[in-house]
Image (spheres, rainbow, N blue to C red):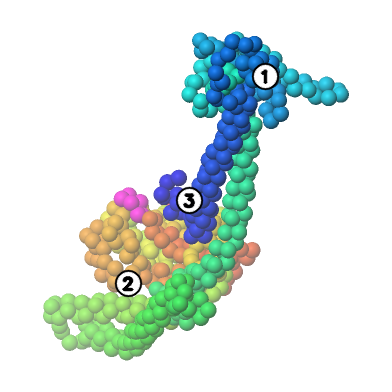
Amino acid sequence: MTAATRRRWSLRTRLVVSAVSLIAVVAAVIGSVTTIAFRSHLYDQLDTQVSTIAARAAGPQERPPRSTGPPAQASGGLAGKDPLKVVTGGGAPVGTVGAEVTDAGALGRSLISTQEETPEDPQVTDRPLTAAQTAALATVPRDGDPHTVTLPGRGDYRVQYVSGIKGDFLVGVPLNPVRNTLNTLIVVEVCVTVAGLAAAGIAGGVLVGIALRPLRRVATTATRVSELPLHRGEVAPLVRVPAAEADPRTEVGQVGAALNRMLGHVGSALRARQESETRVRQFVADAGHELRTPLASIRGYAELTRRGREETGPDTRYALRRIEAEAERMTGLVEDLLLLARLDAGRPLSYGSTDLSPLVVDAVSDARAAGQDHHWRLDLPEPDDPAAIVLADGSRLHQVLVNLLANARTHTPPGTTVTARVRREDGKGRGAGRDAYVGPWVVLEVEDNGPGVPRSLLPHVFERFARGDASRSRAAGSTGLGLAIVQAVVTAHGGTVDVRSVPGRTVFAVRLPAHPGQSPDLGHTPDNNHNRNHSSPTGRGLSTRR
């Protein structure tokens, strides 16, 4: 498991995994110590049992003085008994082995106890060891300590050499019962540990979830604040973390209290920003209204002077024309600023069922008349196709089209091909927030094959007074508000606008919510009186593609 994978885990998962891992380590240590201690205890018991059986077989370790009498008298009356019978005697488990050791160190008789099952009564008998088993038994050191040896076909044994008045013997008992007990203990420990870890994981998940519930409330509050459009417009009072989750005596409370303090600062900054924007908008609106009259007067007096009866020189006539041109340009700038101020103030638009195709035809026809050195093309839906119908303010959308086409005409060299396209798009919702519109959309695109928008300008192309470099020069006297007006109008209609640009292909895409199920009333607005076959005089010379 990599560190990156662990970082992707939630705090709840990491806490539960850490706790369960700690419990697993503790359980493993306890189980290992218990198993080792129990194994040592069982081996001690087994060695004691081996020593007891061996002592019974060999008798006391001190031999009596050697005598010349009969063997029975010399051995104190014990020589008549078979010492190897201890393998089947009381206290010896089934499978006990015993072997006599001669004076030369070789093994003599060797027996092993077995149990024969009979219908009446099970009996324990003995039988000789095989040659291989006897050879394995002969390898046990003769130091009087228990040793582990493997007998072929019988498994491991604990065997001890013992010497006494009855002779020298090797006695051993099987290790299988001890190992079976240890294996059972290990299985029980593993099963109990696994069950305990599962229970700890479930209980830990529940307890950690309860403990982190206040933190989730704090996160929910932060998420709700992050979904607010804080960058523009009037902002409602920001939600706060409840007082129960803002207690500074707890860790989560410290986070909640810090978030509340931060939201307080953000709210103050937003109020200051809103007040500043309101003052600026009001100033722009007031200044625009005040400038309209003097600008109109300047244009009127300049035109009156130029057309007057008094003779004027060429320099004066040129100056008057320049005064008129600059006054007209300033009037356009004032009108643009007033429109942006009205849109920023949320003034209502005149919505109606609008067909984009006639608007595109009119706008492209006007753009062709102003830029005859460009190639203009149309890509529109079929006649009577409702794919281009939106619920919008037709005059404002016409202004959007005019601005986009003027932008393409102004900032591309002669010979550039400009295509105006209308299509329908069924896609996912665009925009932010829970109430973001989910398609279908009507998409209006203006595409050109010019040099493209500079990469450094792309993030700021819709900002007010944005200026491009030489490839998108301001030679035509643009105010820098055209694309800002486009974005403001489209946003007011609940749509989006974006630009994709590479050298040789620039596309401005306007997406507006579709108005399905209705056909446009072609007689309601002058803009909708064009024939869908584009046979009007204003549409001549356009390359049209269905």
Q: Give the residue type that dot 2 points to.
A: Arg
Q: Which residue is mark 2?
A: 464
The image shows residue 180 at horizontal and vertical percentages of: 63, 33
Q: CA distance from mark 3 to mark 2?
A: 34 Å
Type of secondary structure dominating the magenta stretch: strand
Is the N terminus in the top left, top right, bottom left or bottom right quadrant?
top left
Q: Is residue 28 above or below residue 147?
A: below
Query: In this image, 332 relative to 320: left or right?
Result: right
The image shows residue 354 at horizontal and vertical percentages of: 54, 68
Number of residues whose C-alpha sits closer than 10 Å to that of mark 2, classed few (under 14), some (14–19) or many (20 or more): some
The image shows residue 106 at horizontal and vertical percentages of: 53, 11
> Foreground mark, 1 or 3?
1
Residue 228 seen by the camera: no
Q: Which mark is residue 545?
A: 3
Q: Who comes first in sequence, dot 1 or dot 3?
A: 1
* In the image, farthest residue toward the right: 120
Query: In this image, 532 relative to 517: left or right?
Result: left
Number of residues whose C-alpha sits closer than 10 Å to that of mark 1, classed few (under 14), some (14–19) or many (20 or more): few
The residue drawn where x is 28% and y is 85% is 295
Q: Which residue is mark 1?
A: 77
The image shows residue 173 at horizontal and vertical percentages of: 62, 26
> Foreground mark, 3 or 2?
2
Q: Who comes first in sequence, dot 3 or dot 2?
A: 2
Where disc 3 sits, the SS reads strand
Provide the residue span drawn in magenta: 501-506
The residue drawn where x is 54% and y is 67% is 211
Q: Which mark is residue 291?
A: none
- The image quarter in which residue 102 lies: top right
